[in-house]
Image (spheres, rainbow, N blue to C red):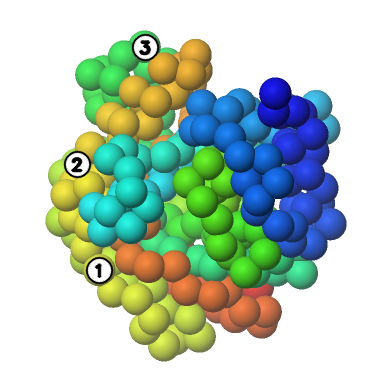
């Protein structure tokens, strides 16, 4: 039997102490279903400390990443209000942070089915996600990364725009004014809307409804890059403006 609470505590402590741990599966092999149970147990620990659920983040939203990890579906994690970043990220609280550009969706009403999620969206924005695997050397198996809440750490977004087609918009990420990644939102499953629908499907399958005010991060449009201390990051999306954060 896998001790789900013990594994969740190990990851939670690693995040709170900003100290990496060995992959959980090195000592305790477990499957994907158990990994999501560990993820939820970790989120419940955060909720008991007063954090509120704020949305869903998607992972493995590129076909290349799916092939690399040997999976045929995306993975997902949960966002809390404590992860939301207005203007600055304290990277000393993280282990080995990386940042990536995102498309963010704002949910305007409760979502009861995956088919209804697009009509429930009231805003779309350019965003960023700061990833921070709690595992040593940022190395993990599929169950490990799911248990670790899909490496979620921090996130932010720019001004909201009325929902519209963002299936193929250009994205630019700069650090200290230097371009570090360029790409298209089409890299997100061919269209971020597919990731949005997957978020609703997976959340509903786990007994969660997307709530008004929640954010869905559709997934990375480019590879993540290391996020150093003392940096200024700007992510720009064609027609969506930009979002900035400092460390």
**Residue at the image position 80 percent from the left and 27 percent from the top:** 48
Whether residue 33 is visible here, answered yes or no, is yes
Q: CA distance from mark 3 to mark 1?
A: 32 Å
> Compared to 41, does 13 lie above or below?
below
Q: CA distance from mark 2 to mark 1?
A: 19 Å
Mark with earlier residue (3, 2): 3
Which element is circle 1 on? Answer: strand
The reply to whether callout 3 and callout 1 are in contact (CB within 8 Å) is no
> In the figure, residue 45 lies in which quadrant?
top right
**Residue at the image position 41 percent from the left and 40 percent from the top:** 75
Which element is circle 3 on? Answer: loop
- Depth check: 228 or 134 in front? 134
Q: Position of residue 140 (x, y in %)?
A: 55, 56
Q: Which residue was labeled with disc 3?
A: 112
**Residue at the image position 75 percent from the left and 52 percent from the top:** 15
Mark with earlier residue (2, 1): 2
Which element is circle 2 on? Answer: loop
**Where, quadrant-wise, is the C terminus in this rendering?**
bottom right
**Where, quadrant-wise, is the N terminus in this rendering?**
top right
> In the figure, residue 4 lies in which quadrant?
top right
Q: Which residue was labeled with disc 1?
A: 183
Q: Which residue was labeled with disc 2?
A: 164
Whether residue 104 is visible here, answered yes or no, is no
Mark with earlier residue (3, 1): 3
> Compared to 167, does 212 lie above or below?
above
Q: Is residue 206 left or right of residue 223?
A: right
């Amino acid at each position: 039997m896998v001790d789900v609470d013990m594994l969740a505590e190990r990851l939670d402590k690693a995040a709170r102490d900003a100290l990496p741990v060995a992959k959980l599966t090195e000592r305790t092999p477990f499957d994907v279903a158990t990994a999501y149970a560990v993820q939820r147990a970790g989120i419940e620990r955060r909720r008991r400390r007063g954090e509120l659920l704020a949305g869903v983040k998607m992972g493995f939203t590129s076909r290349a990443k799916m092939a690399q990890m040997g999976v045929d579906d995306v993975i997902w994690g949960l966002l809390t209000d404590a992860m939301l970043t207005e203007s600055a990220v304290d990277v000393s609280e993280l282990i080995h942070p990386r940042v990536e550009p995102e498309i963010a969706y704002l949910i305007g009403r409760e979502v009861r089915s995956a088919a209804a999620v697009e009509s429930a969206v009231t805003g779309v924005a350019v965003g960023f996600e700061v990833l921070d695997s709690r595992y040593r050397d940022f190395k993990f198996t599929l169950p490990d990364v799911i248990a670790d809440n899909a490496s979620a750490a921090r996130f932010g977004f720019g001004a909201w725009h009325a929902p519209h087609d963002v299936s193929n918009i250009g994205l630019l990420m700069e650090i200290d004014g230097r371009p570090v990644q360029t790409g298209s939102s089409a890299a997100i499953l061919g269209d971020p809307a597919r990731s949005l629908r997957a978020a609703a499907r997976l959340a509903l399958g786990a007994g969660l409804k997307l709530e008004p005010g929640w954010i869905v991060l559709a997934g990375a449009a480019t590879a993540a890059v290391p996020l150093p201390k003392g940096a200024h990051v700007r992510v720009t999306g064609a027609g969506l403006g930009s979002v900035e954060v400092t460390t």
